[in-house]
Image: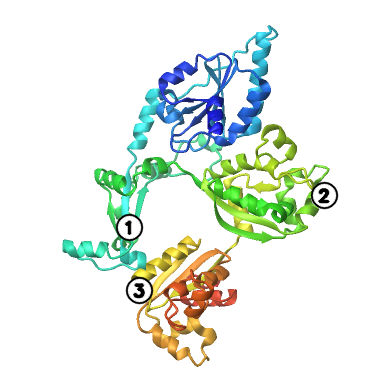
Amino acid sequence: MAGKKREIQLQAVINNQSLWDEMLQNKGLTVIDVYQAWCGPCKAMQTLFRKLKNELNEDEILHFVVAEADSIVTLQSFRDKCEPIFLFSVNGKIIAKINGANAPLVSKKIIKLINEERKIAAGELVRPQYPEIAFVDTEDVVEASHKNNDKLYNMVIIKPEAVLTGKSIEIKEKPDFEDFVSLMTSGQSYILITSQRDEQEPSWEGTVPNPETESKELSEDQHEMATSTVTKKQDSLQEYMERQHLSEFCDIEENKANVNKFIDIFFPDFKSMKNIKLGRIMALLRPDLFQKRKEDVLNIIQDEGFKILMQRQIVLSKEEAQTLCKEHKNEDYYENLIENMTSGPSLALVLLRDNGLQHWKALIGPSTVEEAKECFPESLCVQFAMESLPINQLYGSVSLEAAEKEIEYFFPPQNVLGLIKPHVTHEQREEILNLIKENGFEITQMKELLLNEEQAEAIYFKIKQKHFYKDILEQLSEAPSLVMVLTKWNAISDWRRLMGPTDPNEAKLLSPDSIRARFGQSVLRNAVHGSSNLYEATETINRMFPPENPEEI
């Protein structure tokens, strides 16, 4: 409870317009953490604020508050923002704003403004005339908010049979209601909320303005083309789905009143959840930290709400180490750093969390231990500092764009062919598909087939000469199988691990949570099949899902 009291004393809570107006009467500097009700204040900055409060020792002229944008009219323009926002008020006038949990920048700004206040009080400085930060006019905000609320959404229900098989089923023009209810409750459906972009986003290529050509008048043909482009009517979702021959797969609701009603039923948190921005980032534990305190770091990562999507041990090459450490290239310790980074395995991680990039940056702190001790003493950089190097033992992507490139490099996607056998019931098939997705696989291709001998051979070509091959053909001919291409990093090994041992009895002993342990009946009827190596995976995928362009093989 003591910790809670300290937080409340450190930052006053402003959650209505009256308290906001009262806060503006503060003398000196007030640092305002503007937050959204659904995500709360930026806890990562509280350590810095407490440190500055203690060091500057200026209770009369330094104040910290948290302000809920959703409840304060003045802060309407900051609603629906995921990134932390810090405002700086001097004697009731908002003079500066910083986006993001940038501890060094926030710290520098506070120290600068407090030093100015001290000099002004001592008569050494005339108060600077800072321009006041202008918030968006309330009427404009209301209009924009109204426009956003009026954004049209559609609801799409992908029917159970389409979810299971990826194929459409014939439905009568006016089906019997009981038959319809039976159909729609026969298995899992996917419910999607979709919307159309307000305008086409231009390509980055070819968008640099050219003064010489911009001033010229359009020719008649160009004018007609431009006019037709502007006035071209966008298809409705129903029209688009029909044109793509997908309408049999799903039901589409476009009536605004009905869509809003269904959103409230199926997605009660939609209005708040639609603002959450999920992004994958890559993190790395350097060799010394990985060897000595890996479990401590992983526990903190999970406690902070990150999901570990993928992880692997990797010994970096010299070139890879130089790329990851390029910001330290001009430092005296650079050569020792590269030698350390290539001396043993590092742990690479792919992490997922709402606003994950900013949260990870705030959590690990600056790139050097010296800077972290000064500005962010409770960061992981300080907590896991090693004598071997003066830098942060944890690495994180600098941007979401960089993260995707790093993930693609360190975790290159791999394809594996997966097969769900005929004896598996529809209910069991649903469970297996859920297990596949929960284990990070993407089902990139899928089709249901009653396998003939030629197709079975394409999958089981490696054991065609075995004495039990005819038994396999016989059980595959009993009913349709579901054939899939599964994609993720290390897909072949992970799929074999998820399937479990070939014999379900052995699987129940050695891997009780595996698919074969849960759904297998015998060695032949063991629920699933998969490629055992890269060559086999490539061959079977090309045979079962031949590319449209043969040159792609």
What residue would you read off at disc 1? 241
Question: What kind of residue is marked 1?
Answer: Met
Mark 3 to mark 1 CA distance (whole Å): 30 Å
Position in image of residue 422 (x %, y %) = 38, 78
How many residues crowd mark 1 within 10 Å: few (<14), some (14–19), many (20+)?
A: some
Residue where numbered disc 2 is placed: 335
Judged from the image, the secondary structure of the residue bearing numbered disc 1 is helix
Mark closer to the observer (2, 3): 3
In the rendered structure, are the residues bearing label 2 and label 3 in contact, judged by CB atoms less than 8 Å apart?
no
Q: How does the figure colour the protein chain or chains?
A: rainbow
Mark 3 surroundings: few (<14), some (14-19) or many (≥20) residues within 10 A: few
Left or right of 419: which side holds 153?
left
What type is the residue that disc 2 sits on? Glu
Q: Secondary structure at mark 3?
A: loop
First of labels 3, 1 by sequence position: 1
Classify 135 as above or below 285: above
Toward the top, the furthest residue is: 123
32 lies left or right of 75:
right
